[in-house]
Image: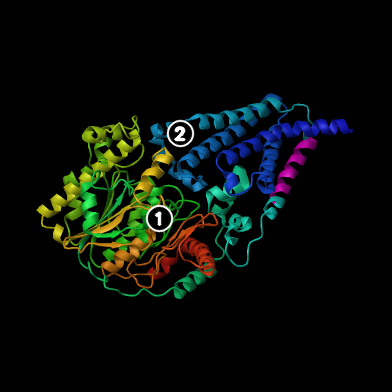
Amino acid sequence: MDKKQLLRLGGSAAGAVLPFWLLDLTLRATTGGAAWYPLYAAAPNLFSLGFGALFAALCLLPRRRAVGRVLYGLIYAVWAVYAVVQYGIWRIFDRFLFLSDFLLAGEGLGFAGYIRQLMDARFVLVVALLILWGTLGVWRLPEDLPRRRVCPVLALFFVLTQFVAPRLYAPVPETLDWDSWQSSGYEYERFSSSAYDLALTGPYQFVARDAYLSVLPNADAVEQRAQIDAFFDERPAHEENQMTGLLSGKNLILVQLESVDDFVLNDANTPTLARLQREGINFAEFYTPQYANGYTFNTEFAAQTGVYPYANGNVAYSLSRSAFPYALGNLLAHVDYTANSFHKSEAKFYNRGAMHQAFGYEQYHSALDYAQDELQASDDRFLADCEELYSAMTAQQPFADFLITYSGHLGYDEIDALTTYALEQFPEYRDDSRPYEINGLFAKARLTDEMFAHLLERLEEDGLLENTVICVYDDHYAYGLTDREVLEEYSEAAGGRLLERTPCFIWYQGCTPQVVTKTLQTVDLLPTLANLFGLEVSDTMGRDAFDPNYEGYVIFPNGGWMTDTAYAKNGQIVWNNGMTDAEVSEMNAYARRFQEINDAILDTDYYAQATE
């Protein structure tokens, strides 16, 4: 074979490989991948060229060119759809889906109207480019290549890229000094930040490595348990304080709000909630970092267990058989509370029927089982107004009820039926000077607020209010607003240091109002409530807000962190009001260790030891 033939052969093969690389480059470029890892870096490009070679080899195997073209089109179409989905997810959440997150895709199917709002010029351009690359690939697929020579070479190239590309990342640092967490080799091993990981690997290796890590057996369980033990031994033991046992024996209604952000909760939009917050114990710097997707369930998991879910996948379906003896429902059940949970969705959604039982709740009650239709079940007021649900909440004392509201769920546009309904119920929120979505969000939040008003009234009429504690926290910031600038503007006006700051407060009759300004996070809620109710404050990733040994912090899934005095994001100090370089370095290392210990607890079913 002469030089010209070799060049022609190489050019023809490249024509089949390059569209897959262009798909990857388009996805990484349009989702800000360069902010995490350079677009021109060798590793992700090698990975994508290698997978492109593998896909091309498969399509060149059939003798008939038409069959090969169909096969090429099918393979490319699957990846193109995957890229479009991930682009849409990134537009909403600034992150991507891991494979396990696709188990939660059913929730998104119910909000097609919201997704349509993302169909702007940028979205159309991305889709058009992906279609163009695929069309060129199908059209350019050669038919006269010597398959027996070319296909093995392409397959060998794929194998070589799998061997070479991982070795091009920066070495894993021996110690996590300042900035060392950004080591590409460390993140490739850990694979915990979807935005960073896709930038490191491209979409094909992102899926392959995610799948590999999902089935990899845990051979280090004994060592991991030892590391967990050491972590808790080194941490100062919980110290009883003036709040210990303050609420012992009282009924508890724990409410997780849906999208009632800090700028939403005020006297104008939610007068009942605003009054309870003002009269109670207000945790003014409470943050809900979003580990993985399925934000609502992942937040309830963290609040109930004091442990965050995996940053690279959900736990609703993978950990339902794990032991959580120190989850809130189990702790209260041990002191003879009757514990039940309530929400709109069916028990199978997020596997709540099984997961809430693991948390210690006797029964999960879905409003859909009692309502006339879905719209009635979606109105949070139904939780308090339905006789059967209210009876299940209060029939036996002391009771512990876990309510998850729904009305504030996205979307907030003209297409969303619940938004239209809420604005009909509260026409005063039709304000043409504001974006329609803001009006929809505020009106939906008012439905939730009315639920609280009805519930308080019923509890007082039945003589239960004076012995009942109401604890309220939010599942996540109002990410459902499609205009990011509007969201940031409203959040900043409310005084939040970050979007992730959300409401959290505890109210009961006779409470002395106080504002706690310590920086707190979702996993701190469990130990704080345990301390207030005089229960065992066990070793979890959270800490009691009133423990004098706890200075307060929040750890984000991408390795960032925040304390009262400094905030680090993407390896950079965003602001610093007094931490020394040594303290910053120590906190940076601690944030990574925090996540490693958190995941090790999940990997090893660590708390099962307490039940043996």
State the quadrant of the N terminus. Answer: top right
Which three-letter amino acid code belongs to the residue tagged 2?
Leu
Choose between 40 and 209: the one closer to the eye: 40
SS class of the residue under badge 2? loop
State the residue position of label 2. 118
Q: Residue at x 55, y 37 (%)?
A: 83
Q: Residue at x 34, y 59 (%)?
A: 359
Residues at marks 1 and 2 touching, judged by CB atoms closer than 8 Å: no
Q: Residue at x 48, y 51 (%)?
A: 313
User: Which of the 4 quarters of the picture holds residue 608?
Assistant: bottom left
In the rendered image, the vertical position of residue 98 relative to residue 360, given as above or below: above
The magenta segment is 148-162
Q: Position of residue 568 (x, y in %)?
A: 50, 58
Left or right: 26 with respect to 238? right
Q: Residue at x 61, y 58 (%)?
A: 183
Q: Position of residue 496 (x, y in %)?
A: 37, 52
State the quadrant of the C terminus. Answer: bottom left
User: Which of the 4 quarters of the picture holds residue 156?
Assistant: top right
Q: Position of residue 80 (x, y in %)?
A: 57, 34
Mark seen at residue 320: 1
In the rendered image, the vertical position of residue 574 relative to residue 528, given as above or below: above
Q: Position of residue 436 (x, y in %)?
A: 33, 33
Left or right: 311 with respect to 342? right
State whether residue 51 appears in this view.
yes
Closer to the N terminus: mark 1 or mark 2?
2
| Majority secondary structure of magenta residues | helix
Check if residue 56 falls in the magenta segment: no
Which three-letter amino acid code belongs to the residue tagged 1?
Ser
State whether residue 61 appears in this view.
no
In the rendered image, the vertical position of residue 588 relative to residue 36, given as above or below: below
User: Which of the 4 quarters of the picture holds residue 81?
Assistant: top right
